[in-house]
Amino acid sequence: MTQFKKTKLAAAVLAATVAAPASAVSWSAGDWEVSYTGTINLFYNQLDQSAVNAGNSAHLQEGLLPAFHTMKVVGPATNGLTGTAQISFAPDSSSGKTDGQNKSGEDIDMREVFFNVDGSFGTISVGRTLSLFSRGAILNDMTLFGVGAIAGTDTGGTTLGRIGHGYTYAEFNTRFAWKSPDMNGFNVEVGIFDPSEGSGGNVANFETDTPQFQMALNYSTSFDGGSVSLWADGIYQEMSGRNDASGFATTGEVKTHGISLGANVAAGGFGLVATMYDGEALGSVRQVDTNSYQCTAGQCQEAEADGYYIQATYNVSPATKVGVSYGETNQDNVSLVGAVNNTGDSDIERSNELTTVGVYHDVNSWLKVVAEYNDQKSQFGNISNISLGGFIFW
């Protein structure tokens, strides 16, 4: 007989690694344990845009996180092995102003479908979940539970947080990965990922006959009144043009590689996060996107990319945190193929900056309210945003 019970657990909000106050529902079926967690959020945004011919906007939109609904199962320990499995889907709570009732983005976004096998050797993970490159940057970003930057004043779906304004999106990717056991606070994680075949400034057809590789090194320790976390993660991928006559053809190669480093130090209620990344053929938002390389018939040119953010927070009380952060993302010339500045020069750099001031308050174990001021800048104009909203967790 299945027995239902309620327990206090951390919500599996983002790749089961972002802890937030929650009251989860769990039950047992024989030797198996099943739990269901989730979250929904929405923000009111008052937006002021300075770009030419752009208007201001009052807009209701979810923040960086969509709604999450997560089902997790844990199997019985057998012969030194423990199995877990997780499925998370992420519907939107908002739409663009022109989308109407049948809004774009109404499809269910299956963020996570994976299982883990744990033993003395560490953890083998199979399936789709948050990838390793840029994971440390996004999971330590205070705008994860806020709004941050936006893609447009009237758009639907999630906002950007600091994606494209300090780090490249970690993305939810399919992979085989191995994570080592904890070694006095240190662990290593490596994986082979399904490669991404984005299109460059000139649409080309590519083949990826080797996997994408990602890895992460993490270290954490605590001291009297505080803690330190350090991380380093990287990505490498190759793809080659197929010279397919059905569209723009190239025989060039694109090699995507990048590294991200970061630290989170907390002491006496204060917190400081600093992280940076550097690489080539990395998208400013996606790991491989239309701005990360440019190809001709015989060769491809990879864009150089880098970025960083610095964040300082203070816990005014156990339930209230205030914070300020600044970050930017830069990408060199080939990133804006086809775009021109006011001199007609297409050989320009994309640069995005974001300054955020936020207050994050836990009303109780299942309700969080958030207020942010965000000021984002790029060569296309500036957008300032005052946002107020919140989350429910279960």
Image (cartoon, grey):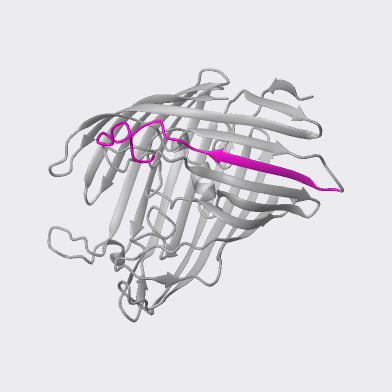
Q: From this view, report whether residue 26 is shown above or below residue 242.
A: above
- List the single residue furthest toward the right: 79
User: Residue 274: image x %, image y %?
Assistant: 48, 47
Residue drawn 44% across and 44% down?
310
Q: Is residue 326 above or below residue 287?
A: above
Q: Would you say 394 lies left or right of 196 here?
A: right
- Can you see residue 17? no
User: Which corner quadrant of the image does residue 292 belong to?
Assistant: bottom left
Q: Position of residue 356 (x, y in %)?
A: 37, 36
Q: In the depicted view, which residue is nearer to us: 287 or 114?
A: 114
Q: Which is nearer the eye, 129 or 280?
A: 129
Question: Who's the residue at 22% across and 34% down the image?
Answer: 48
Say whether residue 93 is magenta.
yes
Please state the extent of the stretch shown in magenta in the rendering: 80-105
Instruction: Please state the horizontal and vertical placement of residue 178, each as a whole percent of the image.
Output: 68, 56
- In the visual, does 246 lie left or right of 324? left
| Closer to the camera in the image, 229 or 149 | 149
Of residue 234 and residue 319, the one placed in the foreground of this image is: 234
Q: Residue at x 67, y 31 (%)?
A: 35
Q: Main secondary structure of the magenta part?
A: loop
Work out whether 151 lies above or below 56.
Answer: below
In the rendering, at what x and y percent does residue 39 appear?
52, 29
Residue located 65% across and 57% down the image: 177
Which residue of the protein is positioned furthest toward the top in this rendering? 363
In the picture, the quarter occupied by the C terminus is top right
Q: Is residue 188 visible?
A: yes
